[in-house]
């Protein structure tokens, strides 16, 4: 069996972002590991940041971490996390939460493939596609 999974990188605000996503997806943050005891060249003021964590819930499992301060991160539009839903009410609620303080690229609306669809970048720079078959 093979499984592909998203692993998100942040610049020091990973826990904040995961708390936001936990609320959006009704999920839990698990396996939190900080840099506290890591044998790595990490500044003292970064030791409380997350070296690894997972967001786990019904239909979602995302891994994430705070990249080392000397690791440049470039936010781009070359990847989106896609969420497929089957209830309009849940879709609208998720869209409202993820798009708050973010950038909407395609407003949630009906499509020619008989679905509600939206594309956005949330306030943490993560790109999302939301799709709900009608």
Image (tube, rainbow, N blue to C red):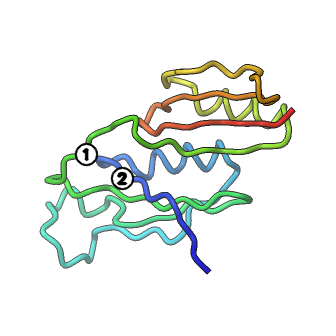
Q: Give percent across and percent down for residue 16.
A: 45, 46
Residue 82 image position (x, y, % from top left) = 61, 44
Nearest the viewer among 108 and 47 is 108
The image shows residue 15, relative to residue 1, as above or below, that is above
Residue 90 placement, left or right of 7: right
Residue pictured at 54% horizontal, 28% vertical: 120
On residue 73, the disc is 1
The quadrant the N terminus occupies is bottom right
Seen in the picture, residue 132 relative to 104 is either above or below; the reply is: below
User: In the image, what residue occupies the spot 52% across and 21% down?
Assistant: 105
Neighbourhood count class around disc 2 (C-alpha, 10 Å): few under 14, some 14–19, many 20 upward:
many
First-in-chain label (2 vs 1): 2
Which residue is painted at 31% across and 49% down in the image? 12
The residue most toward the front is 112
Marks 2 and 1 close (CB-CB < 8 Å): yes
- Looking at the picture, tell me which residue is in the foreground, 15 or 54: 54
Residue 51's label in the rendered image is none
Q: Which residue is mark 2?
A: 9
The x, y position of residue 68, in whole percent, is 22, 58
Residue 39 lies, with reference to residue 5, above or below; the image says below
> In terms of secondary structure, where does tag 1 sit?
loop
Dot 1, how many residues are within 10 Å of its Cα: few (below 14), some (14-19), or many (20+)? Answer: few
Q: Quadrant of residue 96?
A: top right
In this rendering, position of residue 15 left or right of residue 26: left
Q: CA distance from mark 2 to mark 1?
A: 8 Å
- Residue 118: % across, % down: 64, 27
The mark tally for this picture is 2
């Amino acid at each position: 069996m093979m499984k592909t999974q998203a692993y998100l990188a942040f610049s020091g605000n990973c826990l904040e972002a995961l708390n936001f996503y936990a609320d959006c997806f009704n999920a839990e943050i698990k396996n939190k590991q900080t840099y506290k005891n890591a044998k790595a060249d990490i500044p003292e003021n970064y030791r409380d940041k997350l070296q690894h964590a997972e967001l786990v819930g019904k239909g979602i499992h995302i891994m994430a971490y705070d990249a080392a301060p000397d690791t440049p991160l470039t936010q781009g539009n070359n990847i989106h996390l896609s969420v497929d839903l089957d209830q309009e009410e849940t879709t609208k609620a998720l869209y409202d939460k993820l798009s708050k303080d973010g950038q909407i690229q395609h407003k949630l609306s009906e499509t020619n493939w008989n679905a509600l669809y939206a594309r956005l970048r949330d306030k943490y720079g993560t790109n999302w596609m939301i799709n709900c078959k009608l």
